[in-house]
Image: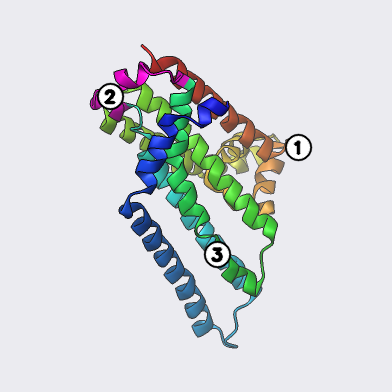
Amino acid sequence: MKSALMNPVLNKEIRLRFRSVKSFIGIASYLAILGLISLGFIGLTLNFDAMGTFQPEQSRGMFLLISMLQLALVIFIAPGLTGGVISSERERQTLPILLTTAQSSSAIILSKLFSSLAYLVLLVFASAPLYMIVFLYGGISPGNVLASFGLYVFAMLVIGSIGVLLSTLIRRTIIAMVTTYSIAFFMTGGLAVITLMLTSFSWTFQNQGQDYIWPFLFAAVNIPIMFFSVFEPGFLEEFQSLAGLSVSPWLIFFTVYGLVIVGALTLAIRKLRP
């Protein structure tokens, strides 16, 4: 495992990504925009509040706004970072040279995945000081912050693993990236729409006294819905009672996407060498 994580491929990719001036300009620009949004939220709240105060409930709303923006960032950027890591090597005709080195297929795949997501991890964790503004006014706990950052990393691994797999299977970088974006958007927005559509039929089953598990199952595998339930734990209770199940939605969430990560990386490693 050590050789898979500490190898020349990973070192080269990390240096190429973090020695560029554009990378630091991107981080500074993102933090500036996120900071302006946070200060603007506080300013508007104080302006429209009759007492001119910033309450803990409003602080919780600002935390939710920042967190959902960061989740949208992860969903939007992760496919672009990982959807072409292998296919671009193939298009530049450097993949055969890479395969002739002493690096194993697992080392190459894991190095490409971690180096691609390293910049996104830095981008997300660089915004941690902005969350200290929320702590000044209360309304959230350290557990909420740790859970949100943990879900950021998990979502990166899920989308990144799918992107690496598609980049390995598809020869054209553009097609691989578009396919990765399509799957990522379906996993987030598409499953949310399906959940809402299925929920609209729930009254029929409620009138007949029958269990209706499909909204609960689709909600349990939807990343934004599960992320929102971190701040509103009772959000999924209605789906769970409608389904008549006592199983935790988090068990379904981590089991399904854990299998997706392992399966995607395993298949990518096996398909790397023709």
Residue at the outermost right position: 246
The residue singled out by tag 3 in the image is 129
Q: Earlier in the sequence, mark 2 or mark 1?
A: 2
What amino acid does circle 3 point to? Pro
Whether residue 67 is visible to the viewer of this picture, yes or no, is: yes
Work out how far the residue at label 1 is from the one at label 3, CA to CA, in angstroms: 38 Å
Position of residue 191 relative to residue 5, above or below, is below
Disc nearest the viewer among 1 and 3: 3
Q: Which mark is residue 246?
A: 1
The one of 115 and 101 positioned closer to us in this rendering: 101
What amino acid does circle 2 point to? Thr
> Does residue 92 show up magenta in the picture?
yes
Where disc 2 sits, the SS reads: loop
Work out how far the residue at label 2 is from the one at label 3, CA to CA, in angstroms: 40 Å
Q: Which residues are magenta?
A: 87-105
The one of 122 and 144 positioned closer to us in this rendering: 122
Mark 3 residue crowding within 10 angstroms, few (<14) / some (14–19) / many (20+):
few
> Does residue 194 show up magenta in the picture?
no
Q: Which mark is residue 206?
A: none
Task: Say which quadrant the C terminus sits in.
Answer: top left
